[in-house]
Image (tube, helix red, strand yellow):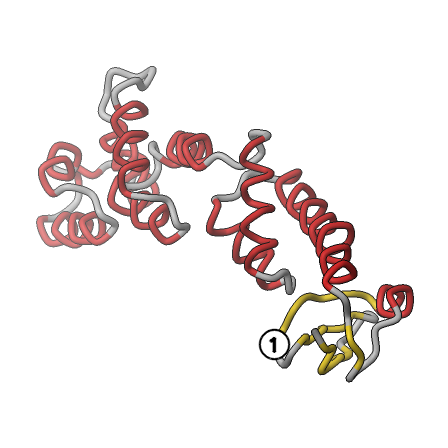
Amino acid sequence: MIVTRLEELEQSKVKVYIDDSYAFLLYQKDIENFGLKEETVISQTCYEKILEDTVYRRAKQKALAILKFMDRTEQELRIKLTDAGYPEDIVKNTLAYVAEYGYLNDERYTASYVRARMNSKSKLVIKTELLHKGISKDIIDEIFQSEYDNTESNEDAELTAIRKAVAKKTKSPETLSPGEKQKLMASLYRKGFEIGKIKKIVN
């Protein structure tokens, strides 16, 4: 293997290319410590040592630092690690590492996400947001069933969300003119609420 390019970036970071392909991101001090120079041979042993002891270690540290402040989906964490310059295999191993220790759990994330929004947003909007975050449809459907069927209130969570949305527009929906009601219902429908449930609140 030959170090074919060392691309210097900001903050003393260096992208290392081996055999003309991007390999990993190091700091300038790492480059000096490992004695890496363009057009020089790097042994398999040295390559693996860099990956395991430096790149993989830092990837795990970064992942844990990200998750320390708030839960992330697997897709969100994958994107952040990839954007930070970690190679695909390192990202994959890092995701497996944090998942093994319970730091990454799409089911837990989804349940928390739904509970925080079910009384203010429609199911459709919440599902769309979760799909965009990389949560699978199966997980969403499973969490929807458990969370919406086990609310503390006897009222449908979406009806509660509609009531809150209406309250932001008017204190007395019954006093609205037919045209105003139609406009309000159209607005709620565009937010993903079912028309039948909307009519129960705006009537």
Number of labels in the image equals 1
| 15 relative to 118 in the view: left or right | right
Front residue of this view, candidates 202 and 86: 86
Tell me the quadrant of the picture where the N terminus can be found. Answer: bottom right
Q: Position of residue 134 (x, y in %)?
A: 39, 50
Q: Position of residue 56 (x, y in %)?
A: 69, 51
Q: Position of residue 149 (x, y in %)?
A: 25, 20
| 4 relative to 145 in the view: left or right | right
Tell me the SS state at disc 1: strand
| 165 relative to 25 in the view: left or right | left
- Specify the amino acid type for callout 1: Ser
Q: Quadrant of residue 60?
A: top right
Q: Residue at x 59, y 30 (%)?
A: 101
Q: Quadrant of residue 3?
A: bottom right
Tell me the quadrant of the picture where the C terminus can be found. Answer: top left
Q: Residues within 10 Å of mark 1 (few under 14, many from 20)?
A: few
Q: Position of residue 188 (x, y in %)?
A: 22, 48
Q: Which residue is mark 1?
A: 21
Q: Is residue 2 above or below residue 75?
A: below
Q: Residue at x 12, y 32 (%)?
A: 200
Q: Is residue 18 above or below residue 137?
A: below
Q: Is residue 80 above or below residue 144?
A: below
Front residue of this view, candidates 85 and 172: 85
Q: Residue at x 59, y 38 (%)?
A: 98
Front residue of this view, candidates 112 and 153: 112
